[in-house]
Amino acid sequence: MRTDSSPGTLPAREHLPAGDAGTPVLDVVIPVYNEEKDLQPCVRRLHEHLRRTFPYAFRITIADNASTDTTPLVSQRLAAEIPEVRAFRLEQKGRGRALRTVWSASDAPVLAYMDVDLSTDLNALLPLVAPLISGHSDLAIGSRLARSSRVVRGPKREFISRAYNLILRGSLHARFSDAQCGFKAIRRDVAQVLLPLVEDTGWFFDTEMLVIAERAGLRIHEVPVDWVDDPDSTVHIVRTATEDLKGVWRVGKALATGALPLDRITRPFGDDPRDRDVQDVPKGLARQLVGFCVVGGLSTLFYLLLYSVFRQFCGSQIANALALLVSAVANTAANRRLTFGVRGRGGAVRHQAQGLVVFGIGLALTSGSLAALGAATSDPAHSTELAVLIAANLAATVLRFLLFRAWVFPERDESPSRSTVVTTYTPSAAPAYGTRQPYAPLPTRPTAHHYATAPYSPPTPYTPQTTYNPQSLYDATVPSQPLRPTDTDTDTDTDPRNS
C-alpha cells in the first residue's frame, strides 16, 4: 500500500544554471568488473570527447564493483593522471548496486552512465543529457530499437533484445523502446527520490527504474543511437534473462497491489501543462460526455424496446418514427437535467422544440438506413433491422451531442458586458518617451565556451538622452531631391523611362 499521500515531493523542472568551471554539471559513471584491458582506452577516449565537445564542467567516475584483476590499479592511475576522473571501489558485484551507490553520493545535477566497451557512439552523449540540463525531461535513455538507430550485432542478441522489450510492453505496459541499452542519464533531484524505490542491484536495475519513473508520470526522453556489439562481452545471457523475468514478475506484482508509493515521485500540481487554467477552453466536457453516453445508452435501450412493441401492430417506418419520437423527448429531458445541469422550467419548451429538430435529423438517418435495407432485400430479418438501426443511431448520437452542446444547451457567458470606448488621438495627448521604462538592448548570444567559463551578466540598460516631441513631426520639412538627374529637357521628354 502507498505510504505517502502527498501531492508530490519533486520540484518543478528548471534549466540548470551555468555555474563556475570547477563545478561539475555532468557525472558520467562507468561501472566495471575485471576490465583491466579496456578501461584505460575507454576513459581516455571519453575524456577527450567531453573536453572537446561538452560546454559544461564534467566528471568521469569509475565504479569498480569487486574486480579481482588489476582494474583497481588502472582506475587509481587514471584518477591520478586526469583531474576530471575519480575512482570508486565497491566490495560487492552488481551494476545496479554500483550505479545506486555512486549516483547517491554524487553532487552533479545530471548523472549518466555508459558501458566500458563504448558500444554506443559518443556523439549521442550531448543529445542525451541536453533535455535534462534544460529541464525538459527527468530521465533520458539511448534506444537501439528506434527507426533511425544504426545497430551492428548478431541475430541472437537482436532476437533476445526485441523479445524482452515485447515482454515489458505486454506485461508492464512499458512505452519506452529499449530498457537494456547501457546509455542512460537522470537528473540528481529525481534520482534522490527514485533510487530508494528500486530494489534490483543487477542488470534489471535499468528496467525497474524506468518502469517506476514512467508509472509515476516522469518524462523519459529517448535518443536514437548508433551501436556496435562487443563480441568479447562477459554478460551471461541466460542468467541475465532469467533474473530479468523474475524482476518483471516482482515489479508487476508490486504495481498491481499498489505496493509502490508512486506519489512520492510525482511532479507538483501545475508543472504539467494539463493542470493549468487555460482561457477559452471548454470546461466540463469530460463530465458532459460521460453523462451523455449514459443517457444515450439508456435511451437506445428504451428506443429498441419501444420499436419492438410498436412493430407488433404497424410497419417498420411508423414504428421507428413513434419509438424515436418518444425516446427523443425523454432523451432531451434527461440530458437537460443530468448532462448539462439545466434546472427549472425556464426554456423547457424551447429546449424540447430544438430537441425535436435534432430528432428530425436522427429520424432522417434511421429512416434512410431502413429504406436502404428495404431496397437491398425484400424481407429483412428482425435482427438485421435492429443491427442497421443501432449503427444509424450511433452516427446520430455523435451529431446529437454536438448539437446539444453548441445549440440547444450552450454555455452562457455570465461575465459582465464590456463597453468599448473610442477615443480620438491628438498629438498633444501622447506621452513623452522619457516617461516610459527604458528598453535594454538585446544581449549577444552566448557561445558554448561562454557557458563553461563564466555566468552571463546583462549589459547596462539604455537611457534615452532626448525627449520625443510629436509636434516636431508636423513642423519638420524634408527637402526633395530629384530621382535621376537629367542633362537637357529634350532628354527628359524623349526618354521612355520618364513616362
Image (cartoon, helix red, strand yellow):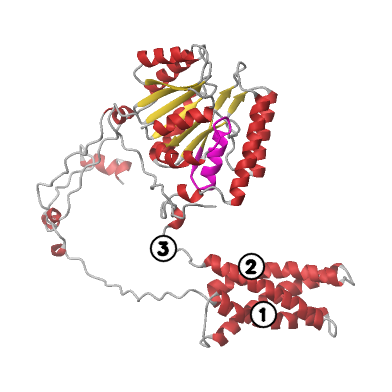
The residue at which mark 3 appears reads as 279
**CA–CA distance between discs 1 and 2?**
14 Å
Q: Are marks 1 and 3 in contact (CB under 8 Å)?
A: no
Q: Look at the picture and state if 234 lies above or below 137.
A: above
Q: Are marks 3 and 2 in contact (CB under 8 Å)?
A: no
Q: Look at the picture and state if 393 lies above or below 29.
A: below
Q: Residues within 10 Å of mark 1 (few under 14, many from 20)?
A: many
Magenta highlight range? 199-221
Where, by quadrant of the figure, is residue 357 drawn?
Answer: bottom right
The residue at which mark 2 appears reads as 398
Do we see residue 6 in this rendering? yes
The residue at which mark 1 appears reads as 328
Residue 183 spot, x, y in % from top left: 51, 29
Q: Residue at x 57, y 32 (%)?
A: 148
Q: Nearer the viewer, residue 12 or 97?
A: 97
Q: Nearer the viewer, residue 416 or 35?
A: 35
Q: Look at the picture and state if 326 lies above or below 373.
A: below
Residue at far front of view: 91
**CA–CA distance between discs 3 and 2?**
26 Å
Look at label 1 and name its amino acid.
Ala
Q: Residues within 10 Å of mark 2 (few under 14, many from 20)?
A: few
**CA–CA distance between discs 1 and 3?**
34 Å
Q: Residue at x 44, y 42 (%)?
A: 193
| Lower position in the chain sequence, tag 1 or tag 3 | 3
Q: Is residue 200 magenta?
A: yes
Q: Residue at x 36, y 14 (%)?
A: 80
Q: Is residue 301 magenta?
A: no
Residue 346 spot, x, y in % from top left: 51, 87
Q: Which mark is residue 348?
A: none
Look at label 3 and name its amino acid.
Gln
Look at label 2 and name its amino acid.
Val
Residue 142 spot, x, y in % from top left: 53, 32
